[in-house]
């Protein structure tokens, strides 16, 4: 036979063994054991070798279209649909979207087609050196929490923050979006996680002042032996959640890599649905997008025991996730808070006395609560913009207005006297 004959390693090995059979150095049974194939298969292959020579060992499907190959019409339709609707999508994500349109194919098949058409280029990611850390063993043992700032509604649009939570053991995700990375967003995201899974044992966060603070403790905190905490930290402390600070983005790599998944898939999903508002994005997240990610990427924990806990008895999450500050009751039983005045009503039991400290709590919905000795106080807001100074007199002698007249000491005032003589009389130096 003229020309070249391409053979695989397995076919070349079979040629060498069959050649030894031909020279009576091996029998068919020994050949079967050496090649690891059945005796009947050896009979068929050796017979074809004797009839056709070396060509008989080459796989008969070589050079022919695969029986499992997709029809050309199917391939052309897929390429056309990718170009018109999913341009820029990775082969894996594009294959998922195409399956939803009724065109089911493997992502590697789509990758080969796109590379051949010049619509996709291989991207090599250089590995960065980092120390490997083993996953936690239990679901809820450690949950990573971080915000991702990105133009989610397209290039040139305002950057919003997607607060993302990822369980370290399973990779289970949950997220929520807002305009900025605020304490309120962090609280609402953790509240959503607790409603769905329970209270996690610990959170892994960065050192942003939303989660932790490194300020010096106040005198009151020093006397009570309290560590300075943010509003988010206080809420976690009430729930028994430990906050662990990460020293680098790589330390919380699971949530950082999850940001990349969202910035690829969620951006495309928002564009596909025509969503351009934060409210619409959150509806999409809660409406199945996150569940689909978990179904695809989450894995089972090493130990099936769930480390999530129920909310402690007596705690109302609506009051746990709030902002609390201490204020002092004035002589007229009012409290000033955020440049507003509130009148504490007389029928409170117990009624705080002037000078007493009350706890002012602002809920996430804007509602304000006041507490004294652990009990909620009744109060009413003071709507008047001006508050008279008690005991002050005006120019005419009427009370209620402060005087602007400059006080000048009289001629007989001690300030005008002989200080040396006064010291000699009193003996004060």
Image (cartoon, rainbow, N blue to C red):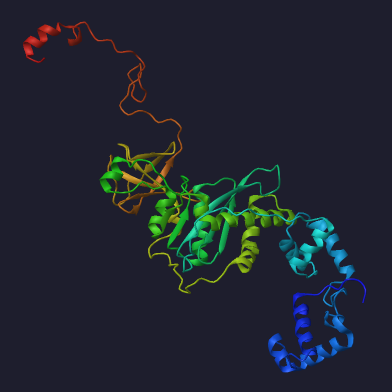
Q: Residue furthest right?
A: 2
Q: Judge left or right: residue 240 versus residue 157.
A: left
In this rendering, the answer to whether 45 lies above or below 196 is below
Q: Is residue 311 visible?
A: yes
Q: Residue at x 75, y 66 (%)?
A: 108
For the C terminus, the quadrant is top left
In this rendering, the answer to whether 289 lies above or below 329 is below
For the N terminus, the quadrant is bottom right
Q: Position of residue 69 (x, y in %)?
A: 84, 73
**Quarter assignment of residue 45:** bottom right
Q: Position of residue 219 (x, y in %)?
A: 29, 40
Q: Judge left or right: residue 27 versus residue 234.
A: right
Q: Position of residue 411 (x, y in %)?
A: 21, 5
236 or 383: nearer the viewer: 236
10 or 318: nearer the viewer: 10
**Quarter assignment of residue 8:** bottom right
State how many labels appear.
Answer: 0
In this rendering, the answer to whether 66 lies above or below 368 is below
Q: Residue at x 57, y 69 (%)?
A: 299
In this rendering, the answer to whether 25 lies above or below 107 is below
Q: Position of residue 79 (x, y in %)?
A: 84, 61
**Quarter assignment of residue 213:** top left
Q: Is residue 164 visible?
A: no
Q: Residue at x 28, y 10 (%)?
A: 408
Q: Judge left or right: residue 182 versus residue 429.
A: right
């Amino acid at each position: 036979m003229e020309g070249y004959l391409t053979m695989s390693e397995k076919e070349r090995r079979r040629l060498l063994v069959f050649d030894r059979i031909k020279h009576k150095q091996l029998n068919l049974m020994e050949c079967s054991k050496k090649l690891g194939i059945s005796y009947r298969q050896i009979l068929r292959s050796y017979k074809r070798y004797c009839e056709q020579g070396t060509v008989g060992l080459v796989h008969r499907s070589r050079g022919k279209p695969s029986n499992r190959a997709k029809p050309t019409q199917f391939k052309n339709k897929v390429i056309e649909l990718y170009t018109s609707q999913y341009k820029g999508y990775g082969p894996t994500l594009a294959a998922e979207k195409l399956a939803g349109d009724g065109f089911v194919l493997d992502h590697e098949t789509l990758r080969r087609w796109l590379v051949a058409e010049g619509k996709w280029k291989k991207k090599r990611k250089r590995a960065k050196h980092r120390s490997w850390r083993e996953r936690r063993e239990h679901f809820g043992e450690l949950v990573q929490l971080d915000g991702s700032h990105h133009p989610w509604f397209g290039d040139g649009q305002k950057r919003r923050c997607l607060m993302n939570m990822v369980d370290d053991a399973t990779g289970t995700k949950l997220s929520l979006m807002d305009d900025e990375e605020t304490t309120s967003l962090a609280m609402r995201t953790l509240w959503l996680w607790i409603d769905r899974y329970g209270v996690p044992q610990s959170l892994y966060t960065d050192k942003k002042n939303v989660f932790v603070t490194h300020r010096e403790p106040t005198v009151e905190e020093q006397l009570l032996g309290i560590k300075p905490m943010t509003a988010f930290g206080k809420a976690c402390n009430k729930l028994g959640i430990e906050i662990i600070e990460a020293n680098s983005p790589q330390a919380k790599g699971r949530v950082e890599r999850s940001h990349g998944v969202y910035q690829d898939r969620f951006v495309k999903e928002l564009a596909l649905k025509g969503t351009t508002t934060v409210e619409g994005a959150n509806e999409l997240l809660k409406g199945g997008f996150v569940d689909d990610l978990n179904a695809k990427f989450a894995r089972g924990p090493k130990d099936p025991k769930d480390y999530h806990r129920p909310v402690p008895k007596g705690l109302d999450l609506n009051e746990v996730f709030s902002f609390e500050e201490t204020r002092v009751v004035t002589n007229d039983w009012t409290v000033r808070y955020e440049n507003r005045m509130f009148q504490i009503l007389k029928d409170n039991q117990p009624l705080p006395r002037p000078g007493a400290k009350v706890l002012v709590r602002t809920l996430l919905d804007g509602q304000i609560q006041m507490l004294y000795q652990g009990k909620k106080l009744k109060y009413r807001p003071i709507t008047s913009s001006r508050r008279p100074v008690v005991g002050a007199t005006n120019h005419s002698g009427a009370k209620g207005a402060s005087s602007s007249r400059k006080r000048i000491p009289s001629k007989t005032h001690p300030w005008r006297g002989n200080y040396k003589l006064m010291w000699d009389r009193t003996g004060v130096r």
